[in-house]
Amino acid sequence: MVRNMLALLVLIGLVIWGVYDSGKDSQVRGKEELTQEETKVSVGVKQGNLAPDFELKTLDGKNIKLSDLRGKRVVVNLWATWCPPCRAEMPDMQEFYETYKNKGIVVLGVNLTTKERQPESIAKFIEQFGLTFPILLDEQGHVADLYQSVAIPTSYIIDSKGIIHRKVVGPMNKEMMEDMLLSLD
């Protein structure tokens, strides 16, 4: 009886702590300190906003966190295997990545796994297109919701400080990516 009561009190304490803790830094998680510049910028998915942070796993189980890529320019590309425009842009996305991966540019392909008809086809898709940039799995749909993905592909162009410079709905080609990313800091 005493053991059950103690367990219940611990559980209630953890719930209260979780609710309290979740409100402390709900906009940007995982960054202990924000720079003075970052504290002046709102977190959101519009141009000029600090890109919302997320952490997802790759097919091989590696975790990648967007905020860990600060200092690099990033393309966050939301896609699915069954999407014809997504398929159309992948060769250009791969070519762009190969050309600029050693020049401070990262491409993150975020697969909208919850929207996949056959999630087992993701690995086959990656192999078919010879993709070598990180492919992240949005298995719970949190990033799709966070980034307000209505149509795919949707890409966000993010500068080295984590600021969104552009949202592109629809497929991109290598020249578009070069125009948008090479002028960023």
Image: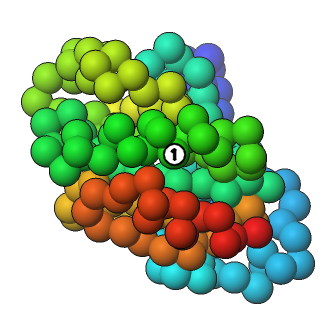
Left or right: 8 as drawn, with respect to 125? right
Task: Please tell me which residue is depicted at 67% across the width and 72% down the height of the picture.
Answer: 183
Task: Please tell me which residue is depicted at 78% across the width and 75% down the height of the picture.
Answer: 38
Quarter of the picture holding the C terminus: bottom right
Q: Quadrant of residue 161?
A: bottom right
Left or right: 101 as drawn, with respect to 153? right
Q: Is residue 30 visible from the viewing direction of this image?
A: no
- Pinpoint residue 12: horizontal percent, then vertical percent: 57, 42
- Pinpoint residue 115: horizontal percent, then vertical percent: 18, 40
- Pinpoint residue 134: horizontal percent, then vertical percent: 52, 32
Question: Please, what is the three-letter code of the amino acid marked with disc 1?
Answer: Phe
Circle 1 SS class: helix
Residue under label 1, please give it. 96
In the rendered image, the vertical position of residue 126 relative to residue 166, given as above or below: above
Instruction: Tell which of 150 and 177 is nearer to you.
Output: 177
Q: Residues within 10 Å of mark 1 (few under 14, many from 20)?
A: many
